[in-house]
Image (cartoon, grey):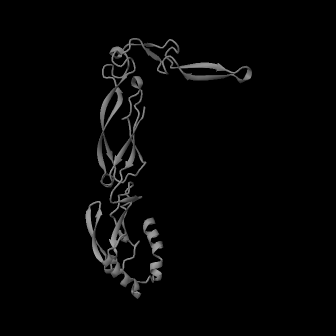
Amino acid sequence: SDIRIRLGLTLDQIANGVEKKIKLNRFTACETCSGTGAENGTSFSTCPTCNGAGEIRQQAGGGFFQQIVVSACPTCQGEGRIVSRPCTVCEGKGRTEQEDVVSVKIPAGVQEGMNLSVRGRGHAGVRGGSAGDLIIQIEEKPSEDFTRDGDNLIHELFISFPDAALGTQVDVPTLEGKVRIKVPAGTQSGKVVRLKGKGLPNINGYGRGNLLIQINVWTPEALSAEETKLLRKLQEAHNFQPNPTQEQRGLFSRIREFFSS
């Protein structure tokens, strides 16, 4: 009797938590017979097959290895009684299908593929049986600004070669709005700037993740004649020949540490 649905959420909704009103078709207890399946709720008679026990016992095997097999009565499905005059609205099932709106509070920090269960908001059981659950599978909607890595968020920032060489200040997006970061002169492509606590909240309450700004130096694919001439001069300059320090050679290891922390 469970109902399974998929619910798409934006990163903003995941970061702050959200209350969603979900419209769905589900079986609810028949109002006419109060879910009993019987006309006026009282039209029952004792099951003639099990005499009200709700189960039948059968002997299996032979000789010294006889055993008693107990199973639910096939006539009354284990209820011990049968509907003598079925409800005309639900045809004796005790439930009817209706459009319903269920309000669900989604906690902050949920992740793609996570299942949330709302107890008792699935289909109503047949003739007063237990209701199932509403099971919600979380789906994350793609973000234009961020990629998610656990509780961390990653933003790719592209800057020009002059900005990388001379340094600059750049506005970058966060979940709370834009903030300005400083890009030091001589920044290498692949450098990661960590904004602590600007990621997503942990669903278990263990703080917030970080926002990792991965800086990429953008190289133009087409150059004008004047631009080509300027770069030719720079190409011959000694200071523009790659000569990474030991610290810069270990950049990859630091990037890996950023993403694993």
Would you identify the image quadrant in which residue 202 lies?
A: bottom left
Q: Nearer the viewer, residue 132 or 246?
A: 246
Which residue, as the protein is rendered here, is positioned at the far front?
A: 225
Instruction: Give above or below for 30 relative to 43.
Output: below
Residue at x 39% of width, y 17% of height: 92
Would you identify the image quadrant in which residue 66 lies?
A: top right
Q: Position of residue 16 (x, y in %)?
A: 30, 54
Compared across the picture, whether 63 is left or right of 121 comes to right
Residue at x 41% of width, y 50% of height: 112
Residue at x 33% of width, y 57% of height: 144
Q: Nearer the viewer, residue 187 or 161?
A: 161
Q: Position of residue 136 (x, y in %)?
A: 39, 42
Would you identify the image quadrant in which residue 123 lies?
A: top left
Q: Quadrant of the C terminus?
A: bottom left
Which residue, as the protein is rendered here, is positioned at the far bottom?
A: 238
Q: Position of residue 170 (x, y in %)?
A: 28, 71
Residue at x 45% of width, y 73% of height: 254
Tell how many labels: 0
Which residue, as the protein is rendered here, is positioned at the far right?
A: 63
Q: Position of residue 250 (x, y in %)?
A: 47, 77
Q: Quadrant of the N terminus?
A: top left
